[in-house]
Amino acid sequence: MNHALGISSYLIVAPMLALLAASLVPVMLKVFSGNREPHPFVTTTYGFIAVATALGLAITFLGGSKFGFHNALVSDGLSLWASVIVLVSGGFSIFMMHDHVETQTKLFSEKVFLLLGSLIGMLIVVLSNDLIVTFLGIETMSLCLYVLIAMSRETILSKEAAFKYFILGSFASAIFLYGIALIYGTAGTTQFPGLMEQVGPLLESRNHLFLIGIVFVVLGFAFKVSVFPFHFWTPDVYQGAPTPVTAFMATAVKAATFVAILRLFQSTGYQHSLPLKEVISWLAALTMLVGNAAAIMQANFKRMLAYSSVAHSGYLMVGVVAAGFGDSQGVASAAGIVVLFYLLAYSIMTLGSFAFVALLEKSVGQALQVDDVRGLARSHPVLAGCMAIVLFSLAGVPPLLGFFGKFGLFSLAIEQNFYWLAIWGVLNSVISVYYYLRPIVLMYMQGEDSSANAPLIEMNKHIMTRFTLFGSAVLIIIMGMFSSPILAALKAAILGRS
């Protein structure tokens, strides 16, 4: 590697180095002060500075079409926008952690350290140009999350959730790694560009080992983004984890993993395998159905949002199907634009919804029920109004941001002749309206339950969490109105990498 290439490599990983250096500061302060926990505001400040610095470095040095560390990492439009989504989600999650009763404890500095460590893993995933590097990034991300979930003050659910996540995640990692081994044994490479060149010939020649390897890798990804039938851990882990950590998992983890899936399916060669096309199409369809159907039956607010997250993974899989099995040239780039836009919209909406839950949670171990929001619009009209905007957007009601995200995905499916998937997606969006409207009906059309809403008086302390909810509602409206410029910026970034 020459000198110039070495500098380029280190510039690409500059955001990760910034996160690593800054994450050590609160922990070292605690060590050198006799194990006394720094003030939560100090730790939050260091964490936010770390994320803001990494975000600035990502915007400065990422983009274009650059490679680093012998082509193991790639800096392009896809990685730039994905890094922005991941880092912004992490920043707002730190804000929520500062306010929340389950995370603002004597181990707060360790929790921020683990969250920043998980962010490093996510950046590795979105910058990865190699399946092995992707695996390393996923494991770095996941190991931090396992511990972060288990550190909740809630004594039963969090430990159970962390154990389930760890055990099932270990199985998924083993399947993923075995798939990489099969791919390397048949294709002779694990780097995405070389792999994409060989997908067509290998599938056309009916190389079953290669096909099994691709399927195993897809299954490993499917676990991380809660695709049916690998979604069963999601409601338990989302409920058992502290709400700020749940918000972080539901946004940043999904964004990073779907970018890796997109890189795997950037080849027209997948059209040579009709069975693979059918399998992934049905995974998308069943994920939408199972997520929405299960969400209708939930009384617990976080479990309802968890199954909603499963359904949104199904919508995003429609974009993956279009990327890998579309008929026209350049469809992978078009799918990347649409999927990134949807991930951006979904992250904003999900952060707002979990900020709402965090504000209303009464105490450690006492879950928020959907019925607890009864009459909330009378006592806290701004809070109820912001949440109503978030829920309408999640349901895909125009002209909010969520509508344009779903419209883009389903339009892409229609353009690539996946009519049945588009119709299925629209029908499932109609189903989702029921459980998204239920809290709105309770807030605005039901009498107030004074016992349920009494703890909201303490909400005045949660400035950062309220800012997250309010900011999400404002962004949903503004970005919905100006979705075209955002899509144009994404298009310029994605197409500029070729």
Image: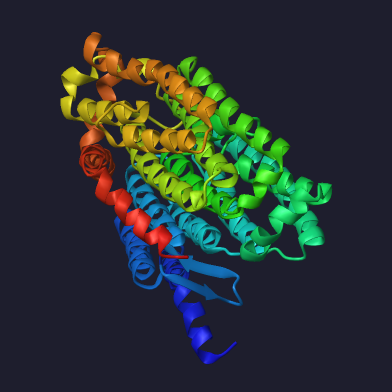
- Please state which of residues 252 and 27 is positioned toward the viewer in this rendering: 252
Q: In this image, 478 relative to 138: left or right? A: left
Horizontal relation, residue 18 to residue 291: left or right:
left
Between 356 and 361, the residue placed more toward the observer is 356
Residue that lies at the very extreme toward the bottom in this rendered image: 3
Q: How is the image coloured?
A: rainbow
> Where does the image place residue 360, in percent across and percent down from the top left?
32, 29
Observer able to see residue 232: no
Residue occupying the point 51% across, 58% down: 126
Question: Residue 297 location in percent, x, y?
Answer: 49, 14
Quarter of the image where one finds residue 393: top left
Residue 421 to residue 131: above or below: above
The quadrant of the picture occupied by the N terminus is: bottom right
User: Residue 378 location, x and y as percent?
Assistant: 17, 18
The image position of residue 58, as x and y in percent, is 39, 67
Which residue does the image show at 59% across and 59% down from the upper left?
137
Q: Is residue 426 above or below residue 177?
A: above
Q: Which residue is rendered at x = 42% and y = 71% of the image? A: 18
The number of numbered badges drawn on the structure is 0
Can residue 78 be spotted in the picture? Answer: yes
Front residue of 108/486: it is 486
